[in-house]
Image (cartoon, rainbow, N blue to C red):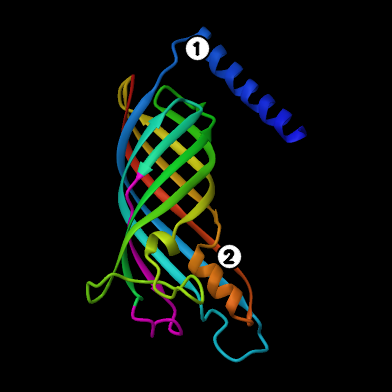
Amino acid sequence: MRKFFILLMVVFCLTTTFAQETINKPFKVSIGGGGFVTGNFSSWFVDKDLPGSLDRYDVSHFGIGPFLFADLKYLEINLAFPLGFLNADDTMSANPNFPARTYALRGGLYLKYPFTISSMFTLFPMLGADYDFYLLAKRDDDRDAKFPISAGNQNADPMDALNTLWFKAGIGLDTFFTDHLFLRTELLYGLRFPNKMEQYLKDTRSDVNFMLGHGGDFKIAIGYRF
């Protein structure tokens, strides 16, 4: 009941803020699109007393792609299409599914608070979440990559094995060329939940203490404010 009351208060405060903004001056909406680069890492922390490299399960995932955004001043909604390259350290490289090319769909929702520096620059801190939905993964031989997620399923599709939820924070900058046209840049970093493949590997390997998923994005786009 207490959590529900807190949620109602947050919704009320946000609604009041938007309403007051609309009364004081016309509410301005922006849309735009551009490109981004992203890095996604899983760092595994293992028992030092057992033989082997201390980073023997580490995985790196780099990508680029286009994205679109809609901006409601205090809220940014975005949709991205990252094209990635998934690789593992030497211990896991014997797996024929590494490296793999990945194709994903990412949706994001961020709260932001803009500060007007001048008529040309607006700075805004950001806090929010992304969800990565992996559509396809291809091996070097162009066959579909498969991943282990349970003892009974060692050949799961990427959408079953790699999907994950992110929480990120960062900062953005809008540079206005006219009253309507602007350049948006954003720098974000955050943590994510383990995907099903990582959770399975973690649960089945006694030498693993814990796994940390982390990564960030750099975005640049052209926007138009109505």
Q: Name the amino acid, label 1.
A: Thr
CA gap, disc 2 and disc 1: 42 Å
Percent of width and height locating residue 70: 38, 31
The stretch in magenta equals 80-96
Which residue is the extreme one toward the front?
A: 152
Residue in the image at 41% along x and 44% along y: 107
* Side of 77 relative to 50 (left or right): left
Question: Residue extending furthest top?
Answer: 23
- Front residue of this view, candidates 104 and 220: 104
Q: Is residue 101 above or below residue 128?
A: below
The residue tagged 2 is 212
- Residue at 41% x, 72% y: name it: 147
The spot of residue 75 in percent (x, y) is: 49, 30
**Magenta-colored stretch includes residue 83:** yes
Please rate how many residues cluster around mark 2, counting C-alpha atoms within 10 Å: few if below 14, some from 14 to 19, many from 20: some
Number of numbered labels in the structure image: 2
